[in-house]
Image (cartoon, grey):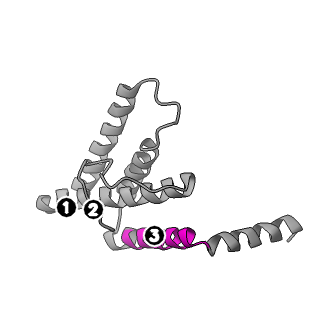
Amino acid sequence: MDLTGISCLSVCRERMRLPYMTDQCEQMLKISNEFVRLQVSNEEYLCMKVLLLLSTVPKDGLKSQSVFEELRMSYIKELGKAIVKREENSSKNWQRFYQLTKLLDSMHDVMNFILNNGTGVGVSRYTGIDDNHDI
């Protein structure tokens, strides 16, 4: 390992000792455990991944907000279809949709914190449900 790699490792170790980084690592571990607990399918994961990307609006804004919203809504519908395909009991579909969007919110909050060194909002960006609870 060269000196650049060694200095990078020591910087990473120092950053990991910061309280906010420890909290974020713990939150990422919770998210990972929630993926396992919910047994997220590949189709659900792909829809969630796209929705996470679409939840990140450029600082310059959007040139066509309506097209962006239409695209986001189509992936919300696709997530719903993936849930219906997976769940045999239709009464559990909304519960699973809620669980997955809560997981998305947690992922979005961690991503925002890491990228912006800030915190996320307590209202779901996917369902509009106000809920500040952990996963």
Label 1 crowd bin: few (<14), some (14–19), many (20+), radius 10 Å: few
Rendering coords of residue 12 (x, y %): 69, 69
Type of the residue with mark 3:
Gln
User: Which element type, helix, strand or loop, lies under badge 2?
Assistant: helix
The verdict on residue 114 being magenta is: no
Q: Residue 51 has which mark?
A: none
Apparent side of residue 59 relative to residue 121 in the rendered image (left or right)? right
Q: How dense is the environment of label 2, judged by Cα within 10 Å: few (below 14), some, or many (20 and up)?
A: some
Q: Nearer the viewer, residue 5 or 75?
A: 5
Q: Quadrant of the N terminus?
A: bottom right
Q: Which residue is mark 3?
A: 27
Q: Amino acid at mark 1?
A: Gln
Judging by the rendered image, the residue that carries numbered circle 2 is: 99
Residue beneath the point at 49% across and 53% down: 112
Q: CA distance from mark 1 to mark 3?
A: 22 Å
Residue type at mark 2: give it.
Answer: Gln
Spatial distance from mark 2 to mark 1, Cα to Cα?
6 Å
Closest to the observer, 27 or 19:
19
Residue drawn at point x = 38 percent, y = 49 percent: 47
Residue 95 — which label? 1
Within the image, what quadrant is residue 135 found in?
Answer: bottom left
Q: Residues within 10 Å of mark 3 (few under 14, many from 20)?
A: some
Q: Using the numbered discs, state the Cα–Cα distance from disc 2 to disc 3 in whole angstroms.
A: 16 Å
Q: What's the magenta region?
A: 18-34
Q: Of the residues under marks 2 and 3, which one precedes in the sequence?
A: 3
Upstream in sequence: badge 1 or badge 3: 3
Is the C-beta separation of discs 2 and 1 under 8 Å? yes
